Amino acid sequence: MVEQYQMKEIIIDHHFIGEESITADFTYNKQDYSVTFHKSDLEVLNMWVLKEGTSLPANLSDELIHALREEVQQRM
């Protein structure tokens, strides 16, 4: 089971790389993250851990990504 995460916001971008995308910003294990999905199929475009004003590639579990997809889909 995925440890609890706290969704901060979900942003729909109509102009990201010529396609619609959805970015989910959330806190997990006391770290801030941002994951961007293709809006059409919710496949991951990128994942970032946000730390001290910078963003670094994140390594998130498939289970957490699945939970995020489900929440994004429910909110759409």
Image (spheres, grey):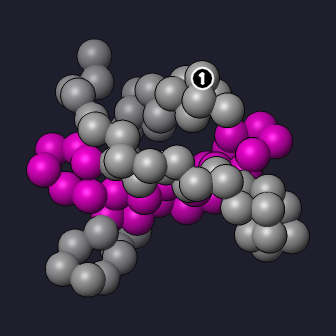
Name the image quarter holding the C terminus.
top right
Instruction: Sort mark 1 into few (<14), some (14-19) or many (20+) by Cα contacts within 10 Å.
Output: few
Q: Picture coordinates of residue 68 (x, y %)?
A: 47, 34
10 part of magenta stretch: no
Whether residue 49 is visible here, answered yes or no, is: yes
Residue drawn at point x = 39 percent, y = 33 percent = 64
The magenta segment is: 27-49
Note whether 43 is above or below 2 in the view shown: below
* Front-most of residues 2 and 27: 27
User: Residue at the location (51% across, 27% down)?
Assistant: 71
Can residue 58 be seen here? The reply is: no
Name the side, left or right, on which 55 lies relative to 45.
left
User: How far from the left and from the top, in percent, is residue 37?
Assistant: 64, 50
Percent x, y of residue 57: 40, 68
Amino acid bearing label 1: Gln
Q: How many marks?
A: 1
Please provide percent x and percent y for residue 22: 64, 51
Q: Main secondary structure of the magenta part?
A: strand
- Give the residue number, with chain letter if any, for mark 1: 74
Does residue 64 lie above or below 43 as drawn?
above
Q: In this orientation, which residue lies closer to the viewer: 59 or 72?
A: 72
Residue at 35% from the left image edge and 74% from the top image edge = 56
Up-down relation of residue 65 to residue 35 (above or below): above
